[in-house]
Image (cartoon, rainbow, N blue to C red):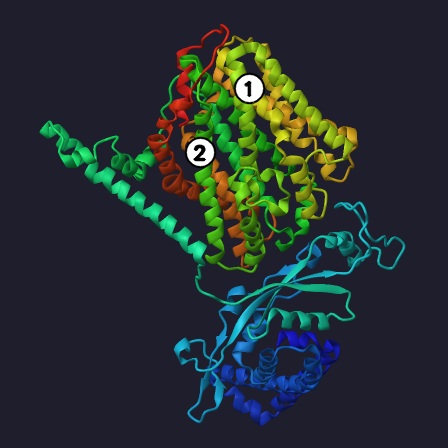
């Protein structure tokens, strides 16, 4: 019925309807002036009075609906044939008109479930109204056959499906996006742009001038309104009605998607995924019971008998069956996860840096992932972007270089120990170790992404997940082959996995420089310095010659433009080669020079420079984010140096903490509570994106944007991501790692290569224990 109303002359209808209502009310007032009636009414009980009041209102409302039907019925008969709607839709619309006349609850539920295009808070940027999603899709009106053979509407939600003998009228939720027509889009558009100048005009100083200050945002962003329509009307039917309604109005609208209530339906791929997850859960249960009940019995029987039976031989430690069952033991995997004991020489401070950096990344994405125009008071977000302290969020992109640096540092620090012990390296094993670490978690997250769309619904569910599924259905292979960071955004399955692809590619460079470090010692550092220089020069030339942005700048009203810039200047591997090589060099110096003696002036200066460098990198982009235009030279300078300098500062923090110059910072970062969370950090990174998508796709109501609101959202998202990471570790990551070590890693000795090197001072053996603490 909402659709029919949109097609009429609203001014005429409202005018006539108002006259009818006022006439009815006036008649009731005149009637109440009768002294006899008033005297009788005064003697009635309060309950009876209230009942009569409701009856009077029903009479007035019924008269208004009669007038409403007379006004629109003729218009509907003229308009509906022009729209060429489907027969079922046309019939349902006339039923809706009749239902309004008779005040049926189902049609008013449908109208009530529809959002309002211009809701409260419009001047503060509220341009979305979801309506009532669950009320709409939960609405169903069965049609029941009378004994006489006629079909009647049963306006009772309690009627079961078995009683539904005719075609039912069901609610269908459609998301409509709308925008207003504006002048041609300026070539350069940012958040500070102004389209209209109303100086010295009657509009100056009015509310219209305030609205016009941010009207340029509508070039890129759209309003959304949820509309509840009968399911017999298709999306095409609804689009025809909208197009007809907006004739002569300077607005454009589009039906994004429509959906009706449906149960859990799984396709073949999703059924297979559910089966695999079920198998992993069952295997973990069996492995845990074996570890808890049978394994102690076997050990005790072997000790008591002094000899092993065929049963104990079959399940003896290190046997095939024993290794498989124990690999899935939740007790064993949790015990390994919660292990906090470390040996002297371990780089414990890295745990704290990992956890804090990952929390920061989740906090950043909590702000950046939601569709901004779905916020209530979205104008506040525009103002927040231009605040100084908000650069902590907007410039959080640099945090990924912390992980590149740490990964490279650990590669050198752990592998040099093995090289000095044996003089041999197994490149094949190193790469397989890396793949065994990444691949199962990435694959399970991809499988979860294919499964999620059938596990829920929401006003924005299709908008979030259909786009992700379209990309993953076609380009899943690029993610699993670790090459998706070279693809455009529209072809990257699980956008955040670009980091994993870049890390795998940088790992090749890391292995090559690691061998050089071992064979040639300090002289090989020049090779690393040259690699950093080449990387920085490449970044500078690309930024300068293409007039590219220095980093991801949030000064465009378009997220598409911002994200496109991010991919072109952020995901290519060579851009992060400098920070990665800094990590390799840091690992070399920490391995050989960890016990260096530094005076307090030198230590203080290094700490001061490190902290100043970190804060300068974070806040240097502030003027660009508030509208100042960068020059090609300044953009090239910042793009070239900020990531590498960030990694140098992080490397100093790690070096100082390991060498005894970290003080209270080292104590905090080395807190044992960080150890388990650090082991989960990779899974948290993988899973926090699907969890954020799920959260915002499921929203039934707009979020009122504010920093307190987003802080609460962050706490919830981080908690859920950590819990999901724990499940992933127990069911996927730990079992596959255990199986890999038991059946694959031990078979790779054939690929070991002996390396010859010149005389290099052998480090303290205690330094070699670090690898064990990070298994």
In this rendering, would 323 be left or right of 716? left
As drawn, the label of residue 107 is: none
Q: Is residue 411 above or below residue 497?
A: above
**54 or 177: nearer the eye?**
177
Q: Residue at x 49, y 69 (%)?
A: 138
Q: Residue at x 69, y 59 (%)?
A: 122
Residue corresponding to mark 2: 437
**Horizontal and vertical percent for residue 391?**
65, 36
Asked if residue 747 shows in the view, the reply is yes
Residue corresponding to mark 1: 513
Looking at this view, name the residue that lies furthest to the left: 305
Q: Is residue 10 above or below residue 296?
A: below
Proximity of marks 2 and 1: CB atoms separated by less than 8 Å: no
**Horizontal and vertical percent for residue 647?**
59, 24
Category of crowding for the residue at label 2, using alpha-carbon neighbours closer than 10 angstroms: few (below 14), some (14–19), many (at least 20):
some
Of callouts 2 and 1, which one flags the residue occurring earlier in the amino acid sequence?
Answer: 2
Q: Residue at x 46, y 22 (%)?
A: 667
> Which of the 4 quarters of the picture holds residue 204?
bottom right
Spatial separation of the CA atoms under disc 2 and disc 1 = 21 Å
Mark nearer the viewer, 2 or 1: 1
Q: Is residue 681 above or below residue 183?
A: above
Asked if residue 708 shows in the view, the reply is no
Q: What secondary structure is marked by label 2?
A: helix
């Amino acid at each position: 019925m909402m659709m029919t109303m949109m097609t009429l002359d609203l001014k005429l209808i409202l005018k006539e309807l108002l006259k009818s209502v006022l006439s009815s009310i006036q008649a009731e007032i005149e009637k109440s002036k009768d002294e006899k009636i008033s005297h009788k009414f005064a003697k009635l009980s309060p309950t009876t009075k209230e009942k009569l009041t409701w009856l009077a209102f029903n009479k007035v409302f019924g008269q208004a609906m009669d007038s409403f039907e007379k006004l629109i019925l003729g218009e509907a008969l003229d308009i509906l044939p022009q729209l060429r709607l489907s027969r079922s839709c046309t019939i349902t619309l006339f039923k809706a008109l009749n239902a309004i006349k008779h005040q049926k609850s189902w049609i008013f539920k449908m109208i009530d479930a529809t959002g309002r295009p211009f809701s409260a808070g419009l001047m503060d940027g509220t341009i979305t109204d979801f309506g009532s999603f669950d009320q709409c899709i939960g609405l169903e009106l069965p049609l029941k056959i009378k004994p006489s053979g006629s079909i009647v509407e049963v306006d009772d939600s309690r009627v079961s499906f078995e009683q539904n003998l005719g075609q039912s009228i069901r609610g269908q939720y459609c998301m409509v996006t709308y925008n207003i027509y504006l002048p041609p889009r300026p070539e350069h558009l940012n958040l500070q742009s102004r389209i209209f100048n109303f100086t010295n005009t009657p509009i100056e100083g009015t509310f219209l001038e305030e609205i016009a200050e941010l009207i340029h945002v509508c070039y890129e962003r759209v309003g959304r309104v949820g509309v509840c329509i009968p399911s017999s009307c298709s999306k095409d039917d609804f689009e025809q009605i909208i197009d007809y309604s907006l004739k002569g109005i300077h607005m454009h609208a589009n039906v994004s998607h429509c959906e009706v209530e449906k149960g859990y339906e799984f396709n073949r791929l999703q059924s297979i995924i559910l089966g695999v997850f079920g198998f992993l859960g069952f295997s973990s249960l069996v492995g845990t019971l074996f570890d808890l009940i049978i394994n102690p019995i076997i050990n005790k029987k072997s000790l008591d008998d002094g000899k092993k039976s065929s049963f104990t031989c079959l399940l003896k430690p290190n046997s095939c069956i024993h290794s498989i069952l124990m690999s899935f033991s939740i007790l064993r995997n949790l015990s390994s996860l919660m292990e906090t004991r470390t040996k002297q020489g371990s780089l414990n401070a890295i745990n704290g840096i990992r956890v804090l950096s990952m929390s920061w990344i989740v906090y950043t994405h909590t702000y950046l992932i939601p569709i901004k125009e779905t916020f209530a008071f979205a104008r506040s977000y525009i103002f927040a972007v231009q605040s100084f302290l908000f650069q902590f969020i907007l410039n959080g992109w640099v945090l990924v270089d912390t992980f590149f640096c740490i990964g490279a540092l650990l590669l050198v620090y752990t592998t040099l120990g093995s090289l000095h012990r044996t003089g041999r390296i197994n490149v094949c094993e190193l790469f397989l170790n890396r793949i065994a670490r990444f691949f199962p978690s990435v694959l399970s997250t991809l499988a979860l992404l294919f499964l999620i769309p059938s596990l829920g619904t929401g006003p924005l569910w299709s908008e979030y997940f259909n786009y992700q599924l379209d990309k993953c259905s076609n380009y899943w292979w690029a993610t699993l082959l670790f090459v998706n960071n070279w693809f455009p955004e529209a072809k990257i399955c699980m956008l955040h996995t670009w980091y994993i692809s870049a890390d795998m590619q940088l790992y090749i460079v890391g292995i090559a420089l690691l061998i050089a470090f071992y064979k040639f010692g300090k002289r090989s550092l020049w090779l690393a310095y040259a690699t950093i220089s080449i990387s920085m020069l490449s970044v500078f030339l690309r930024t300068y010659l293409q007039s590219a942005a220095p980093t991801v700048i949030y000064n465009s009203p378009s997220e598409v433009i911002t994200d496109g810039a991010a991919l072109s200047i952020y995901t290519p591997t060579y851009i992060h080669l400098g920070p990665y090589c800094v990590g390799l060099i840091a690992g070399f110096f920490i391995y050989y020079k960890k016990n260096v003696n530094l005076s307090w002036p030198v230590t203080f200066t290094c700490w001061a420079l490190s902290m100043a460098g970190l804060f300068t990198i974070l806040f240097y982009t502030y003027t660009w984010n508030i509208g100042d235009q960068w020059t090609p030279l300044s953009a090239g300078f910042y793009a070239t140096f900020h990531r590498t300098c960030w990694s140098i500062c992080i490397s100093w923090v790690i070096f100082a903490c390991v060498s005894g110059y970290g003080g209270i910072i080292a104590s905090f970062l080395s807190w044992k509570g960080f150890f388990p969370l650090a082991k989960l950090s990779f899974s948290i990174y993988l899973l926090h994106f699907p969890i954020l998508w799920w959260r915002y796709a499921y929203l039934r109501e707009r979020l009122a944007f504010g920093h307190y609101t987003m802080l609460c959202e962050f706490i919830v998202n981080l908690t859920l991501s950590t819990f999901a990471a724990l499940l992933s570790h127990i069911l996927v990551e730990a079992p596959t790692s255990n199986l890999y070590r038991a059946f694959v890693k031990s078979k790779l000795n054939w690929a070991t290569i002996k390396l010859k090197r010149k005389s290099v001072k052998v480090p303290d053996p205690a330094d070699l224990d670090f690898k064990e603490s990070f298994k």
